[in-house]
Amino acid sequence: MKSIYVGNLPFSATEDEIRDLFAEYGNVESVKLISDRETGRPRGFGFVSMEGAAADSAIRALNGTQMGGRSLRINEAQERQPRRQGGGGSW
């Protein structure tokens, strides 16, 4: 299973719309749109899980396509880097 980053989404995008968009390239395991923790408003990106070959096809076909007047940025999701503790930098 591959995780696909979907960025520059219109704020009006729904999980069903994203699922339908990616389903043309294979079985969509899951869709998760990210919202702001404090306001609950969409952040304009999300993640889609698909099998390897289908994910690769979807990434190639959909990267740069238009949705709601925005050019989508689609690539294989990278592992999230751990946040640094403390935040006190050496200035």
Image (cartoon, rainbow, N blue to C red):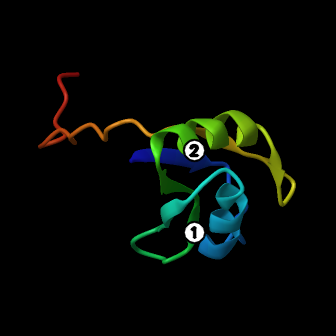
Name the residue that disc number 1 marks: 42
Q: Does 64 sit left or right of 40 as displayed? A: right
Query: Which residue does the image show at 44% across and 40% down from the upper left?
Result: 77
Measured as percent of width and height from the top left, residue 47 is found at: 49, 55
Task: Tell which tag, 1 or 2, sits nearer the viewer.
Answer: 2
What secondary structure is marked by label 1?
strand
Q: Is residue 72 above or below residue 36?
A: above
Badge 2 density bin: few <14, some 14–19, many ≥20, Cα 10 Å: some
Measured as percent of width and height from the top left, residue 74 is found at: 62, 40
Q: Earlier in the sequence, mark 1 or mark 2?
A: 1
Amino acid found under the numbered disc labelled 1: Pro
Amino acid found under the numbered disc labelled 2: Ala
Q: Quadrant of residue 15?
A: bottom right
Measured as percent of width and height from the top left, residue 61 is found at: 74, 38
Tag count? 2
What secondary structure is marked by label 2?
helix
Q: Does 10 sit left or right of 5 as displayed? A: right
